[in-house]
Amino acid sequence: MAGICISFTANLRHEFSELAGLYEAEFGEVRLSHIHKTREPGSPENLDMVVPEGLPAFLSSKGFPFRVID
């Protein structure tokens, strides 16, 4: 699956799910892949995943805090 890898704080997974549901209702099926939990020393647990290419712009427009990772 082509897409963009993003990372966000794991405690925001419910908010992410709600926004992904809104995106899906507007643009069609959302497939998430390569979902991993990561934690860097001194940081909270993160979720890293590959998302459809249009989803990061949608998340940004809703004020959802995430970062794009390589």
Image (cartoon, rainbow, N blue to C red):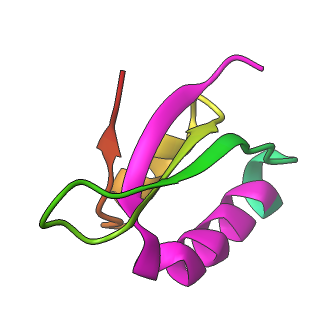
Residue 23 placement (x, y as % from top left): 67, 57
Q: Is residue 13 magenta?
A: yes
Residue at the limit of the structure toward the right, as seen here: 29
Up the image or down, 20 lies above or below 15; here it is above
Up the image or down, 26 lies above or below 9; here it is above
58 or 36: which is nearer to us? 36
Tell me which corner region of the image, top left, top right, bottom left or bottom right, holds residue 2: top right
Residue 22 visible somewhere in the drawing: yes
Q: Is residue 1 left or right of residue 57?
A: right
The quadrant in which the N terminus is found is top right
Name the residue located 64 percent from the left edge and 77 percent from the top edge. Answer: 18
Name the residue located 58 percent from the left edge and 82 percent from the top edge. Answer: 14
Range of the magenta residues? Answer: 1-24
Q: Is residue 37 left or right of residue 38?
A: right
Name the residue located 18 percent from the left edge and 66 percent from the top edge. Answer: 43
Residue 62 placement (x, y as % from top left): 39, 66
Name the residue located 87 percent from the left edge and 47 percent from the top edge. Answer: 29
Residue 57 visible somewhere in the drawing: no
5 or 61: which is nearer to us? 5
Tell me which corner region of the image, top left, top right, bottom left or bottom right, holds residue 44: bottom left
- Helix, strand or loop: magenta stretch: helix
Q: Is residue 54 magenta?
A: no
The quadrant in which the C terminus is found is top left
Residue at the limit of the structure toward the left, as seen here: 42
Residue 51 placement (x, y as % from top left): 62, 39
Q: How many marks?
A: 0
